[in-house]
Amino acid sequence: MALVVGLFLLPWSVLLGLALPAAEFVPNWSLAWMGLDGAEAVAALATAVLLYRGRPRACLPAMAGAALLFADAWFDVCTSAAGAMRWLAVGEAVLVELPLAAAAIWLALSLTRPRS
């Protein structure tokens, strides 16, 4: 099933890139960003709670949080206005979001390694 989804989504994403307008008014813009950042917070808090309880399943919200952070960085940069706002978005991505995502992935992988 994952193979079918992946094979469908690759050409679909190219089609979207060719067909969608470059700019669009987006209602509930602030609500969308609040939801994304809220989901990142929930993933981080769930990871912390599970780590505190010594549960190796903390790898699950850690990986989810990493994916959300990658998405946040991508959309911050892609939707920012050219100039200072774009540089601010790139700086936040490079200095905050991507390192946090990398740390979350490292944590998740370390929790899934067999214990000796």
Image: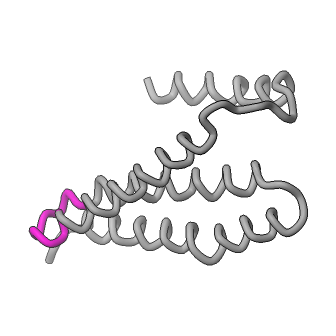
**Quarter of the image holding residue 11?**
top right
Return the residue nearer the eye: 107 or 83. 83
The answer to whether 115 appears left or right of 113 in the picture is left
Image quadrant occupied by the N terminus: top left
Return the residue nearer the eye: 16 or 114. 16
**Quarter of the image holding residue 47?**
bottom left
Check residue 73 for magenta coloring: no
Task: Give residue 28's position: percent from left, percent from top.
Answer: 60, 34
**Quarter of the image holding residue 32?**
top right
Q: Residue furthest right?
A: 83
Is 92 drawn above or below residue 47 in the view shown? below
Image quadrant occupied by the C terminus: bottom left
Question: At 87% from the left edge and 34% from the top edge, which residue is drawn?
Answer: 22
Task: Give residue 23's position: percent from left, percent from top.
Answer: 84, 35
Return the residue nearer the eye: 36 or 19. 36
Question: At 57% from the left edge and 30% from the top edge, which residue is drawn?
Answer: 6
Task: Give residue 108's position: percent from left, percent from top.
Answer: 33, 64
Q: Which residues are magenta?
A: 50-58
Is 71 drawn above or below residue 25 in the view shown? below
Task: Give residue 63's position: percent from left, percent from top.
Answer: 38, 56
User: What is the total number of numbered labels drawn onto the structure image?
Assistant: 0
Q: Main secondary structure of the magenta part?
A: helix
The answer to whether 83 appears left or right of 112 in the picture is right
Is 50 drawn above or below residue 71 in the view shown? below
Question: At 25% from the left edge and 58% from the top edge, which residue is drawn?
Answer: 46
Question: At 52% from the left edge and 58% from the top edge, which residue is drawn?
Answer: 69
Image coloring type: one colour
Q: Residue furthest left?
A: 53
Is 1 drawn above or below residue 94 in the view shown? above
